Amino acid sequence: MGRIFLVELEGRSYRCRFCNNNVALADDVLSRTFNCSQGRAYLFSNVVNITSGPKEERLMLSGMHIVEDIFCCICGQILGWKYVTTHDKYQKYKEGKFVLERWRIVEEMMEDLNGDAHPGSSDMENP
């Protein structure tokens, strides 16, 4: 087995729920209205730190597609799938795009970079 090189993401991002590995930037979300058998899902233009399974033909809610399951490269949990080929001309926009199941990822917000204290917090002790 080779060495794993991880891509670090800056800005709002999504992480694997199981191991906290970076998987996608919030700016790469194309749609938040996808659904899958387990509930909500997001369509992304790009994801990182994943591995792909074999191509397979799968009947989905929108018809027959050739897809690859995608897995977290750290913990191996399935995160979603990649659309490789679609058979319907109205679904062509999905080709090469990634779907991450919402319950398998968590959103990480950017830390406060301006150094302002959050309301109600203080480094000083209360008298």
Image (tube, grey):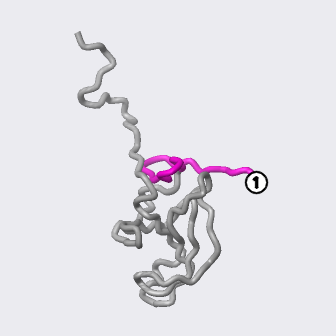
In the current view of this chain or complex, which residue is farthest to the top?
127
Q: Give the residue displayed 52% in from the left and 64% down from the top.
A: 46
Q: Position of residue 16 (x, y in %)?
A: 50, 53
Q: Quick one: 67 or 6, which is closer to the camera?
A: 67
Residue 72 included in the magenta stretch of the image: no
Give the side of residue 54 with respect to residue 99, left or right: right
The residues colored magenta run 1-21
Q: Position of residue 63 (x, y in %)?
A: 44, 86
Above or below 76: residue 44: below
Above or below 21: residue 92: below
Q: Give the residue displayed 45% in from the left and 53% down from the top.
A: 14
Q: Quick one: 52 or 94, which is closer to the camera?
A: 52
Q: Position of residue 99 (x, y in %)?
A: 47, 68
Write down the quadrant of residue 72 in the picture.
bottom right
Give the side of residue 125 with respect to residue 108, left or right: left
Q: Give the residue displayed 31% in from the left and 15% down from the top.
A: 124
SS label for mark 1: loop
For label 1, the residue is 2
Give the side of residue 103 with respect to residue 7, left or right: left
Q: Main secondary structure of the magenta part?
A: loop
Quarter of the picture holding the N terminus: bottom right
Specify the amino acid type for callout 1.
Answer: Gly
Write down the quadrant of residue 122 in the picture.
top left
Quarter of the picture holding the C terminus: top left
Q: Residues within 10 Å of mark 1 (few under 14, many from 20)?
A: few
Q: Position of residue 73 (x, y in %)?
A: 62, 56
Q: Please state the total of marks drawn on the protein image.
A: 1
